[in-house]
Amino acid sequence: MEKLSDELIARLVSSALAARGKAYAPYSRFAVGAAVLAASGEIYCGANVENASYPAGICAERNAIFHAVAMGERRLYAIALCGGKEGEKLGACFPCGICRQVMREFCDPGQFLVVVATSPTDWTVHTLARLLPDSFGPESLG
Ligand code: THU
């Protein structure tokens, strides 16, 4: 994969911001949106969906990734996410540990980009290898 253009990253960020508007977070009031870029070039979105039985809820990143995989994608290039308390200014929301591990399944961690966005024009970019060093993945099983 070649380097992602700023224009493509901006598209991912705006998709994540739009997805955040669909979050179902009545318990935490912490709304998260995510958008994943798959090898086909398609972008898949997700938002966090909570549940009255708290552990049954799921993060935005996993919803976006599982959406992509359920549509037949097996290789992912990047994910953008944004999160924060409803009605408040967005701060940098980094992915939780479980979501980092789920990303690991479908990418090259040295290449996969995690884009943490706080507005349509403000974001930071991190490799998964930095966020999840010395990771366990499909090849680890031999
Ligand atoms: N959440 C995400 O969707 N992604 C993250 O990376 C961190 C946390 C959600 C889960 C829960 O619905 C709410 O944010 C508060 O933890």
Image (cartoon, helix red, strand yellow):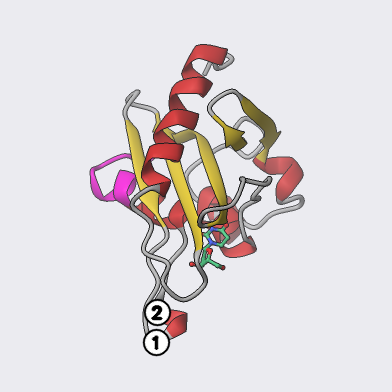
Left or right relative to 36: residue 139: right
Q: Which residues are magenta?
A: 67-75
Q: Which residue is mark 2?
A: 56
Identify residue type, mark 2: Ala
The residue most toward the left is 71
Indicate the position of residue 46 as horizontal and vertical percent values.
37, 49
- What label does residue 53 carry, if any? 1
How crowded pointer 1 is (Cα within 10 Å; few <14, some 14-19, many 20+) is rated as few
Specify whether residue 30 is in view: yes
Of badges 2 and 1, nearer the viewer stands: 1
Q: Separation of disc 2 and disc 1 at Cα?
A: 6 Å
Task: Indicate whether 98 appears above or below 53.
Answer: above
Which residue is depicted at the point 64% across and 58% down? 136
- Which residue is at a point 60% across and 36% down the rendered structure image? 117
Q: Nearer the viewer, residue 50 or 89?
A: 89
Label 2 sits on a secondary structure element that is helix
